[in-house]
C-alpha cells in the first residue's frame, strides 16, 4: 500500500522516515520529495508498505504524531493525489 506523508518538517530526513515506518512493518520504498531548485525537502513523502495490515497500523499509529516538531498526516495515497504530487516534484 502506498502512503502519503504530509506536513513533514523541512529537516526530516528520508532515513528518519524509514526508521519511523519500519517499526510498523516491512518497507518497500520510502521517497522524500525534494525541491530540485533548492535541494530542500518539500515537506511530504511517499512510503510503500507491501503488507496492507502493516500499512493500516502505521497510518493509525503515526497520523497526527509529532515528528521533528511537526504534526504529520499519514493516509493512503490515492492514485490521482500521488500523480499530482509526483508531477509537482518534477518542477
Image (cartoon, helix red, strand yellow):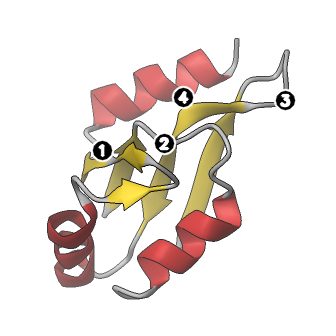
Residue 13, picture quadrant = bottom right
61 with respect to 12 (left or right): left
Write the residue at 30% across / 44% down: 77
Q: CA distance from mark 4 to mark 3?
A: 16 Å
Write the residue at 26% across / 72% down: 58
Q: Nearer the viewer, residue 32 or 84?
A: 32
For marks 2 and 1, give the one nearer the viewer. Answer: 2
Q: Earlier in the sequence, mark 2 or mark 1?
A: 2
Q: In this rendering, is residue 81 above or below 9?
A: above
For marks 3 and 2, give the one nearer the viewer. Answer: 2
Q: Earlier in the sequence, mark 2 or mark 4?
A: 2
Tell me the SS state at disc 1: loop
Q: Nearer the viewer, residue 42 or 28?
A: 42
Mark 2 Cα-neighbour bin, 10 Å: few <14, some 14–19, many ≥20: many
Mark 3 Cα-neighbour bin, 10 Å: few <14, some 14–19, many ≥20: few
Q: How many numbered discs sit on the rendered protein?
A: 4
Where does label 2 land, which residue? 8
Whether residue 12 is visible: yes
Q: Earlier in the sequence, mark 3 or mark 2?
A: 2
Mark 1 Cα-neighbour bin, 10 Å: few <14, some 14–19, many ≥20: some
Position in image of residue 3 (x %, y %): 34, 54
For marks 4 and 3, give the one nearer the viewer. Answer: 3
Where does label 1 land, which residue? 77
Q: Earlier in the sequence, mark 4 or mark 3?
A: 3
Where does label 4 land, which residue? 86
Mark 4 Cα-neighbour bin, 10 Å: few <14, some 14–19, many ≥20: some
The quadrant of the image that shows the C terminus is: top right
Write the residue at 30% across / 26% down: 80
Where does label 3 land, which residue? 39
Asked if labels 1 and 2 touch by Cβ distance under 8 angstroms, the answer is no
Amino acid at each position: 500500500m502506498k502512503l502519503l506523508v504530509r506536513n513533514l518538517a523541512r529537516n526530516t530526513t528520508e532515513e528518519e522516515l524509514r526508521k519511523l515506518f519500519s517499526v510498523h512493518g516491512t518497507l518497500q520504498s520510502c521517497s522524500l520529495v525534494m525541491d530540485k531548485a533548492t535541494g530542500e525537502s518539500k515537506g511530504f513523502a511517499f512510503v510503500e508498505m507491501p503488507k496492507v495490515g502493516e500499512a493500516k497500523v502505521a497510518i493509525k499509529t503515526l497520523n497526527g504524531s509529532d515528528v521533528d516538531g511537526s504534526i504529520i498526516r499519514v493516509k493512503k495515497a490515492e492514485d490521482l493525489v500521488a500523480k499530482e504530487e509526483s508531477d509537482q516534484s518534477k518542477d
